[in-house]
Amino acid sequence: MKSVYSFVNRSMHGHMVERTLFTMYFLCFHLSLFILSSCDDYDSFTTDRSTTLTFSTDSIVFDTLIATIPSATKTLAVYNRADKGLRISDVWLEAGDDSHFRVNIDGQDLTVAAGRHASDFEVRRRDSIIVRAEVTLPESLSDVATTFEDALHFRLENGMEQRVTLLATALDAFFMRGQTITSDTTFTPQRPIVVYDSLIVAPDVTLTLEAGTQLLFHQESGLTVRGRLVARGTIEQPVVLRTDRTDHIFDYLPYDRLPSRWEGLRFTAESFGNELRGTDIHGGNYGIICDSTASDELKLTLTDCRIHDLGGDGLRMTDVHCIVNNSEISNTLGHCVSLLGGSYSFTHCTLAQFYALSANRGDALNIANVSQDIYHPLKAATFESCVITGYEEDVVMGTWIDTSGLSTDEAAAIGTPQDAFLFDHCFLATEIPTEGDYAQRFVNCIYDDPETEINHEKNFTTIDPRALLYDFTPVEESPIRGTAKTTSRDLLPTDLRGRSRFSDDQPDAGAYEFVKIED
């Protein structure tokens, strides 16, 4: 029995070995065929005229550029969707050596190629190559935008030709580099003015910016006013102070909406009588800084202005006299408005702190009479028919000098903080005041209560932190509606967009009036 068992076992083992070897041979044979077939497909190219390239876009369109300033790089993907490779015999720019566009295809620079022409490219099956394009447009000696067009041509081995359009628009500009204005000067909207190394207005000199004037500041450049600045913008043609970047960081987000792209506007101690109307200041490290003057003379008047999307404070004022009407100051990494000492009046303003790029943002409004243990007399801070709100439950803050260690006469001279400020018919995101003296300084105010269904960002038409798009017009059901004082409406009958505040019985608080659009 043992020998028979042994024989049978050996026999079964032999058959198993044979089956294993056969299986391995079979798999190796077919795997080899598959690999050879795959290699053959991968290395094979078709000349079938029905097989063509596919492009990620049929045109490369650049943002409006400033003439003579190089563009950012645009990328084009060139796909071969076929099961066999495609050979590109020739690639060239239609304008040849006269082209203003610079193109690199699959690592080869057409700019240095004769006639902007290159040959012999391959796109393997189900693969792609990358094209990168840039442009520097010449001055056209024109005050209107000029469009430049070219085309990138592809000729395949099968004889088919395909093209991708290249399109760019340029504006001629005036350039100023480290310049100080030493006599009264007026800038007009003839062309944008690009500022490098900052611009200074000398003492006793007035710079006037006519409606539609654009000042485009390069990185780390700003405007310093030692004399006087007058801006005469309108709703249709605002005066604009912004970055010189005209391209996009993403398709949905231009650099122009980002903060900290330039410095900002600064009024020094000797500057008085500044008037900004219809002015839009955005994208800087700060908006406006007014240095301490220790004077009752009017330093700055803002009317119909927007100051927004900034990497520091929007409006920072120390010991100055300033009037702000019908203006929006919003979305700053620092405080939207920072007041230290001085005398201030805000009417029909929207101070909105919805800065989206950091949770460590400042207040919508910060009022103080002390800094680094130095007392700054706060003479007046009046807010009438204003909206002051933001993401946080309390965006209205104050810092007051401690008078407990002072003599009776010193404490009496300083007074109490509530003697200096007043909120009248405002919409506020702050703790509801209950203490007698403080409560009396909040007259007919409505509070942005986070417990209600309509609160904070839900009060407004558009709050889009992804694309950094904001419209602070109140929605129809917002308690901002009808909050304003009728005497404020008489002073400022139209809102920041030119809409009448007499469209209903009671005007809305803030810089924007809700107007129902009939179907």
Image (cartoon, rainbow, N blue to C red):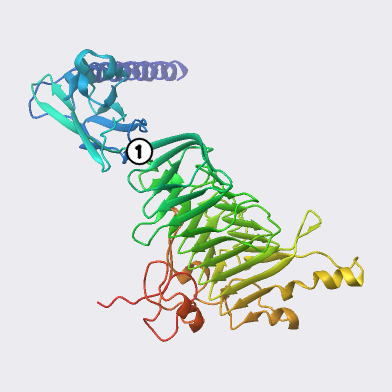
Where residue 456 sits: x, y (%)?
A: 52, 69
Quadrant of the image for the C terminus?
Answer: bottom left
- Residue located at (25% from left, 14% from top): 113
Where residue 374 sits: x, y (%)?
A: 80, 56
Q: Is residue 268 above or below residue 165?
A: below
Front one among 103 and 183: 183
Where residue 408 sits: x, y (%)?
A: 91, 72
Near mark 1 (Cα within 10 A), the count class, few <14, some 14-19 or many ≥20, is many
Quadrant of the image for the N terminus?
Answer: top left
- Residue located at (35% from left, 38% from top): 173
- Residue located at (74% from left, 81% from top): 437
Q: Which residue is mark 1?
A: 173
- Residue most toward the bottom? 505
The disc labelled 1 sits on which kind of residue?
A: Ala
Front one among 168 and 487: 487
**Can residue 245 be seen?**
no
